Amino acid sequence: MRNQIVLLMLLLVATVAQGQSAEDRKTILGILDRQTNDWNAGNIAAFMKGYWESDSLMFVGKNGVTYGYQSTYEGYLRRYPDRATMGTLKFDILHLTFPSNDVAFVVGKWNLTRPEKGDVGGHYTLLWRRINGRWVIVCDHTS
């Protein structure tokens, strides 16, 4: 009887954890979809709402490491000063895992279709944390 209770409790914990991860996965994918729509509307300020508004935010790109929300935002504005440079964004999610309850890790591909400037693309890794009940990107490594 004791083994059956332990087994039942393990199954219950596994079911709750899977349900939580499914909801968290849906939330993160929804944020990425919203970011895509914001980008494609030319709204970098709205696109940034997926990031952690902190001086500890880390963005790693071809020019090195940038720290802080404001610096990351300003970097986007410098690199993408107009709609022609921004192009049309498409994300492909290659991998999404939850190493722990409040941490997610995303690997994907990005592509900008830019008829006037030439298409560009690459890969990215995003480290997410649930902070104050909200999923945010705390580290973005894009190449």
Image (cartoon, grey):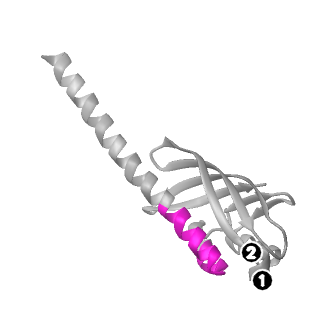
Give the mark count.
2
Residue 143, percent from left and from top: 78, 54
Residue 68, percent from left and from top: 71, 68
- 43 shown above or below 3: below
Nearest the viewer among 66 and 116 is 116
Nearest the viewer among 109 and 101 is 109
Determine the residue positioned at 52% across, 48% down: 103
In the displayed structure, does residue 127 sit left or right of residue 102?
Answer: right
Label 1 and label 2: CA atoms lie apart by: 6 Å
> Label 2, on which residue?
86
- 141 shown above or below 99: below
**Dot 2, how many residues are within 10 Å of its Cα: few (below 14), some (14-19), or many (20+)?**
many
Determine the residue positioned at 84% across, 68% down: 118
In the displayed structure, does residue 133 sit left or right of residue 39?
Answer: left
* 72 part of magenta stretch: no
In the displayed structure, does residue 15 sit left or right of residue 49?
Answer: left
What amino acid type is highlighted by mark number 2?
Met
Determine the residue positioned at 78% across, 79% down: 84
Quarter of the image with the N terminus is: top left
**Dot 1, how many residues are within 10 Å of its Cα: few (below 14), some (14-19), or many (20+)?**
few
Determine the residue positioned at 73% across, 60% down: 59
* 34 part of magenta stretch: yes
Looking at the rendering, which quadrant does residue 16 occupy? top left
Looking at the rendering, which quadrant does residue 87 occupy? bottom right
Q: Which residues are magenta?
A: 30-47
> Label 1, on which residue?
82
What amino acid type is highlighted by mark number 1?
Asp
- 8 shown above or below 141: above
